[in-house]
Image (cartoon, rainbow, N blue to C red):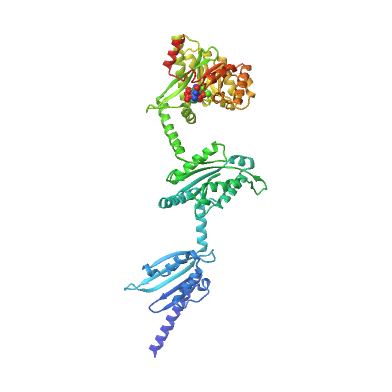
């Protein structure tokens, strides 16, 4: 009897701890917003625990009803969750998947754990559901920040590059094209300066939002930087063709954008396009290519589309190549001079020579100054080159003077970069003195572009040089500075009519009138007039009749070596 009582006591005590533990389990399960399904196929036990009712509106009584829980999962995740439920099919034992529910806003982390017995058969199965919406939203937000541009909602630069790489991988397999468009708002700084940064940002945003409307699974877009956007089109065809997309963009920018302050802004865009595989195979290479032509589009007067092709590519590679080689050439001074004679149009006597630089490349090719001078101006090596030209040409010229004593003028081209240097005037004077040259025999050819800058200092320098006796000639006259206002007070001696006028002097009547007017005006203002690029007898006659003083050009003499000028001098003295 005592025994029995003891046993009953034991049982009830056990029972108490059981219920206490169960309570704790329940408490845990309920407060963690989880629910579990427990299934044992051997005993056919099927239980649910935790907050079942918070997730499902039916009771799980049959194992086959497990699939009913799938109704809660959004369609795109459903198949994955089904596979998770039946992990045993692939003999896996523990897997987690985060699925979105049909309400499109709740995220549930589903875990499936399976125990197997010695024979490999399922002994127990446990599936848990756990609401992770908060965590998922935070994660999405973080990944949004990592992948998206917060102003426009477009991809940010890094993510765009990553996505473009995906496109390219796919295009390689599917042997198709990917177009990359770099789009830049023209004169954006004017919008920013004119309206303030806040409204500038709004423009950036509005245009970005417009671009977003163009996106789909074949078109990705990014705000790349500031007011530069990028689009990539996979397999452009039909409505996604580059020109169709550009048309849509043009159509949009033809109408103003309305800002929150009620004002309206209009702008155009410049677009550069490169294409895989023709324009490059890597994402960065393509972006670079598109950017290069986008800048070219800007140079070409904005509001334009330019395509990157092999010529641009070669040009670009060439310019990098040339830039490197030019550095070496400047180091070794791999240059020499040609001299082109200038003649009096009436007497046909030699008036002087223009020194023209030549670059002898190690491979024997001669590179045109038209190509490398702008590059030297960009890199700054024009200063060293210009010093060399001035020194060398004056040295050669003074030797001729000593040898042949022929009275003529040396014309030397001066880059605006050189001219702007504060020590320019003293440098010229000291070179003139170094060789004992009569300053009135030296003429500096300066293009009109220098006049665009601070006119006062430009004029002061000219006056200083002229006071010293040096002549000033305005090169390429008629092509640059449009105002004729400055002409009457211009401290110069010579105007050199640009070759483009001479080219059409024969056939184009209005050009003829312009030339005649320029020569007449030049004369009245006391300048000497030089026509350059005279290639035919007809041009020579026309210019002579119009009263042009000096003729320079292939017809009377091409640029030649210093020895050939010596031969010429020998013939005429
Ligand atoms: P530029 O000063 O206008 O020089 C005249 C250019 O026209 C020269 O080209 C000359 O060879 C070319 N030319 C002369 N007559 C004719 C003609 O009848 N027909 C044709 N088609 N062309 C003719 P080049 O020597 O290639 O020089 C190109 C430009 O490079 C020069 O234009 C000048 O701006 C620049 N340059 C040349 N040498 C120097 C230099 O030592 N220093 C600087 N800063 N620039 C230079
Ligand atoms: Ca010249
Ligand atoms: Ca010229």
Which of 285 and 395 lies nearest the eye of the viewer?
Answer: 285
Q: Quadrant of residue 189?
A: top right
Residue 199 sits in quarter: top right
Give coordinates of residue 180: x percent, y percent. 49, 46
Residue 454 drawn at (x, y percent): 60, 26
Foreground residue, 479 or 80?
Answer: 479
Report the residue that reaches farthest toward the left: 118
Q: In this rendering, does residue 458 appear at all?
A: yes
Q: Position of residue 261 (x, y in %)?
A: 67, 48
Q: Quadrant of the N terminus?
A: bottom left
Question: Which of 401 and 346 lies nearest the eye of the viewer?
Answer: 346
The x and y percentages for residue 497 are 56, 22
Spot the residue most to the right.
Answer: 262
Residue 151 appears in the picture as rendered? no
Residue visible at 51% across and 69% down in the picture: 72
40 in relation to 95, above or below: below
Tell me: residue 448, above or below residue 569: below
User: Number of callouts in the render?
Assistant: 0
């Amino acid at each position: 009897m005592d025994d029995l009582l003891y046993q009953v006591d034991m049982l009830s005590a056990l029972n108490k701890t059981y219920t206490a533990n169960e309570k704790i389990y329940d408490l845990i399960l309920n407060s963690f917003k989880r629910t579990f399904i427990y299934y044992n196929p051997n005993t056919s036990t099927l239980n649910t625990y935790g907050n079942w009712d918070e997730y499902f509106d039916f009771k799980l009584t049959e194992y086959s009803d497990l699939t009913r829980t799938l109704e809660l999962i959004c369609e795109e995740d459903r198949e994955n969750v089904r596979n998770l439920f039946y992990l045993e099919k692939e003999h896996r034992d523990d897997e987690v998947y985060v699925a979105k529910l049909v309400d499109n806003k709740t995220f549930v982390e589903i875990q499936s754990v399976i125990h197997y017995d010695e024979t490999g058969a399922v002994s127990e199965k446990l599936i848990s559901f756990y609401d992770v919406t908060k965590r998922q939203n935070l994660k999405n937000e973080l990944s949004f920040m990592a992948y998206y541009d917060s102003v426009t909602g477009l991809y940010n630069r890094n993510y765009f590059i990553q996505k473009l790489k995906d496109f390219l991988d796919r295009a390689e397999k599917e042997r198709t094209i990917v177009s990359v468009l770099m789009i830049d708002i023209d004169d954006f700084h004017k919008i920013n300066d004119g309206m303030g940064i806040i409204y500038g940002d709004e423009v950036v945003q509005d245009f970005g939002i417009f671009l977003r409307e163009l996106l789909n699974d074949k078109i990705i877009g990014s705000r790349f930087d500031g007011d530069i956007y990028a689009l990539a089109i996979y397999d452009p065809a039909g409505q996604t063709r580059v020109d169709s997309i550009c048309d849509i963009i043009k159509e949009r920018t033809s109408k103003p954008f309305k800002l929150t302050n009620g004002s309206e802004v209009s702008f155009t865009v410049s677009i550069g396009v490169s294409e895989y595989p023709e324009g490059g195979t890597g994402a960065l290479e393509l972006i670079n290519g598109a950017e290069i032509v986008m800048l070219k589009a800007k140079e070409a007067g904005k509001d334009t589309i330019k395509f990157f092709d092999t010529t641009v590519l070669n040009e670009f590679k060439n310019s990098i190549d040339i830039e490197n080689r030019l550095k070496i050439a400047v180091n070794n001074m791999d240059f020499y001079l040609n001299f082109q004679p200038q003649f009096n149009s009436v007497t046909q006597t030699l008036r002087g020579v223009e020194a023209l630089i030549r670059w002898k490349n190690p491979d024997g090719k001669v590179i045109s100054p038209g190509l490398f001078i702008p590059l030297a101006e960009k890199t700054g090596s024009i200063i060293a080159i210009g010093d060399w030209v001035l020194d060398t040409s004056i040295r050669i010229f003074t030797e001729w003077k000593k040898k042949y004593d022929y009275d003529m003028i040396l014309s030397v081209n001066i880059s605006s970069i050189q001219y702007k240097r504060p020590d320019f005037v003293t440098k010229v004077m000291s070179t003139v003195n170094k060789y004992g040259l009569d300053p009135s025999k030296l003429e500096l050819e300066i293009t009109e572009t220098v006049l665009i800058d601070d006119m006062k200092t430009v004029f002061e320098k000219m006056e200083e040089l002229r006071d010293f006796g040096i002549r000033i000639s305005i090169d390429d006259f008629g092509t640059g500075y449009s105002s004729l206002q400055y002409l009457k007070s211009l401290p110069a001696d010579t105007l050199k009519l640009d070759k483009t006028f001479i080219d059409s002097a024969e056939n184009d009547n209005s050009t003829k009138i312009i030339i005649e007017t320029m020569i007449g005006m030049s004369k009245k203002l006391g300048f000497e007039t030089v026509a350059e690029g005279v290639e035919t007898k007809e041009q020579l006659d026309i210019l002579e009749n119009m009263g042009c003083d000096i003729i320079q050009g292939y017809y009377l003499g091409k640029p030649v070596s210093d020895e050939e000028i010596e031969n010429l001098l020998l013939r005429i003295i």
